[in-house]
Amino acid sequence: MLTKGSRGPWGWPLLLTAIGIIFLLHNFLLLGDFNALSLWPLLLVIAGVVILVRGDFIPAAETRTFGITRGSVESATLEISSGEIDVQIRGLQQEGRLIAGQFAMSARPSMRVSETYTHLKMDRSATPWLSFADWEVGLARDLPWQLLVSSYLGQINLNLADLIVQDSSIATGIGDIRLIAPIEAFGQVQVRSAVGNIHIVTPVGYRTQIVIQKGRLLGVHADERRYVQESASVYSSIDPDDSAPLVEIQVTGSYGDVYLS
């Protein structure tokens, strides 16, 4: 990550400059019979390498860290519309913070507060369209969260093992979802993917009941050491702690596989 005012890698800007010089010389007929236009696929190669290495294409869209203190907030909603950007959510280890993590330029959560409740929103449309840096978000562990997370092409990775969930809706168009079940959920956890795999992990001792509504092209693979199949579409975790609250997870998919572990 670059700090404000620092410079990015020199390699690809120099390469782009060199290609520009070649095209300039070509336009002035100084390269003889050499066809400079044959180099245009190299621009795609450069763009692909930059995105793979840095996560972004344009230097102005570097990821930045952020943190918001909890204050008097007692409950919260986090709404994320990530488009084609990957999202990771986990519990925060640092006390006193409501939310913290990294985001692409202009994607810092907008915040609306009403007494002890707050609504946080991160929107792909607020970021540069060439920015593909992952969004990594940590949430306070001692208050209930409503989670509304969606993408149409990105992957979603949620480690909710030490979070309290009010209810949630997690959905992808084309993309995988990985969910570690929360320790407690007052409402239903809904997980949907049109095209992609869904991985659900129940930590040892947690009590989950997973209901799967599947299409004809959705496969289900459950670890028999961790789950018992109650019916054709219902799976329950094995050997939960007696005091563990029940977490209900609703899974819907059209094409791909569901893995329960």
Image: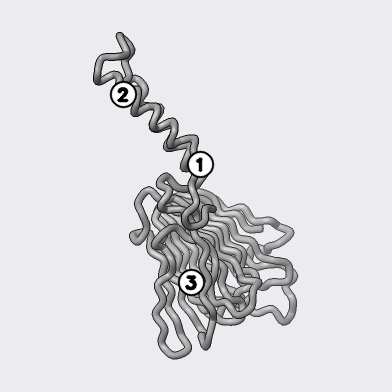
The three-letter code of the residue at mark 3 reads Leu
- In this view of the protein, which residue sits in the foreground, 201 or 18? 18
The residue sitting at 51% across, 85% down in the picture is 73
Residue at the spot of label 1: 9
Could you tell me which residue is drawn at 31 percent across and 15 percent down?
35
Residue drawn at x 50%, y 48% is 256
Identify the amino acid type marked 2: Phe
**Marks 3 & 2, CB-CB < 8 Å contact:** no
Task: Name which of mark 3 and mark 2 comes first in the sequence.
Answer: 2
Quarter holding residue 222: bottom right
| Residue type (three-letter) at the residue carrying disc 1 | Pro
Mark 2 vs 1, N-terminal side: 1
The residue where tag 2 is placed is: 23
Q: Is residue 212 visible?
A: no
Residue 39: x and y in percent read 37, 22
Q: Is residue 31 left or right of residue 222?
A: left
Q: Residue at x 35, y 61 (%)?
A: 126
**How far apart are the alpha carbons under marks 3 and 1?**
37 Å
Disc 3 designates what residue?
147
Horizontal side of residue 182 vs 194, given as left or right = right
